[in-house]
Image (tube, grey):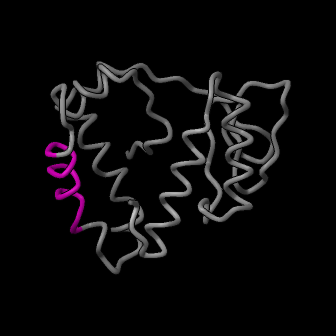
Amino acid sequence: TMFPLCYVGMNADKWREFLGLSIGNPVPYLLRDLHEMETQAQSVEFCEYWYADQRFLTKKVFEFGFEHFDSIERGKDSSGLPLKRVDRSNWQWDRERSYVDCHMLKKSCTDESFKKTYDLVTHVLSGNQSWMLEYQRKFKALLAGQSLE
């Protein structure tokens, strides 16, 4: 059994408790956990690197205690995808419906994929999501080897 990150939701305080993060700078704790995944993530074996995050999360779930989690069976649509999901295999969504999760588009940093993602996020989440535009700008700059100054 593995738990994909996209199926696990908690508020920020519960995530901190779950991951063993103290309030303040999370970087040392994140580096600790990333180091644990590093070997798997750098493997040339597909199943080793593809599931590195799921293995990490599953290990944490069992360490924390599976009994502390609620499980919800959402069901599946006619194509076998979980209900209330926007999926990259058929990126369609309706402004009148609510959604629980999204299987992100590949190459999400491209302008076309980013626009589709941004449109969905601004529909689902209330408030100003302009931070995403700045995030994309900085991400693309880093990919191009540019400084963020």
* In this rendering, position of residue 121 left or right of residue 22: right
Image spot of residue 81 (x, y percent) = 69, 44
Q: Is residue 38 above or below residue 10?
A: below
Image spot of residue 44 (x, y percent) = 34, 80
Residue at image coords 20%, 45%: 27
Taking the magenta stretch, the answer to whether it contains residue 120 is no
Q: Is residue 4 above or below residue 36?
A: above
* In this rendering, position of residue 69 left or right of residue 112: left
Q: Residue furthest bottom?
A: 44
Query: Magenta part of the protein: which range?
Result: 28-39
Q: Quadrant of residue 68?
A: top left
Taking the magenta stretch, the answer to whether it contains residue 35 is yes
Q: Is residue 69 above or below residue 130?
A: above
Residue at image coords 27%, 67%: 40
Residue at image coords 60%, 47%: 133
Of helix, strand and loop, which mostly describes the magenta segment? helix
* In this rendering, position of residue 94 left or right of residue 7: right
Give 89 or 138, whichever is nearer the viewer. Answer: 138
Image spot of residue 146 (x, y percent) = 43, 72
Q: Quadrant of residue 148?
A: bottom left
Total numbered labels? 0
* In this rendering, position of residue 58 left or right of residue 130: left
